[in-house]
Image: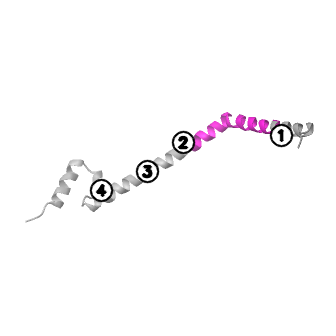
Amino acid sequence: MAVTKSDKAKAVKGLAREVSRVASALERQSSAKHRFLMGLVFGVGTAIGASLIASIIIITIARTLSAIGIDPGTFGQDAGSTIEQQIKLQTPQD
């Protein structure tokens, strides 16, 4: 099978179209609007992910404290009085 000039011309035109398509895609990706939107998406995704991880950690700590007998709701008070309350609650009474 011999490659004809028309086959070569079609191949060159196809390559030129593909290069043009890639160039326009790169131009769109490097635009300020595209960079802004991508930064916004990554920023929101990071904030949502960090919030989920923090929520899971806080819930786990609260459940662990409740399981060992410490009421996590009392931590809004002064830390010293909270510890004293927990000691009184956990100290066996004669």
Please report whichever mark, 2 or 1, sits nearer to the chain's N-terminal start. Answer: 1
Q: Mark 4 falls on what kind of element? A: helix
Mark nearest the camera among 4 and 3 is 3
x and y percentages locating residue 10 in the rendered image: 88, 40
Residue type, label 4: Pro
Which quarter of the rendered picture does the C terminus lie within? bottom left
Magenta region, residue range: 16-42
Residues under labels 4 and 3: Cα distance? 19 Å
Residue type, label 2: Gly
Mark nearest the camera among 1 and 4 is 1
Please report whichever mark, 4 or 3, sits nearer to the chain's N-terminal start. Answer: 3
- 48 lies left or right of 33: left
Kindly identify the residue that appears in the image at 78 percent across and 39 percent down. 18
Q: Is residue 43 magenta?
A: no
Q: Which residue does the numbered mark 3 point to in the structure image? A: 53
Residue type, label 1: Gly
Q: Which residue does the numbered mark 1 point to in the structure image? A: 14
Q: Which residue does the numbered mark 4 point to in the structure image? A: 72
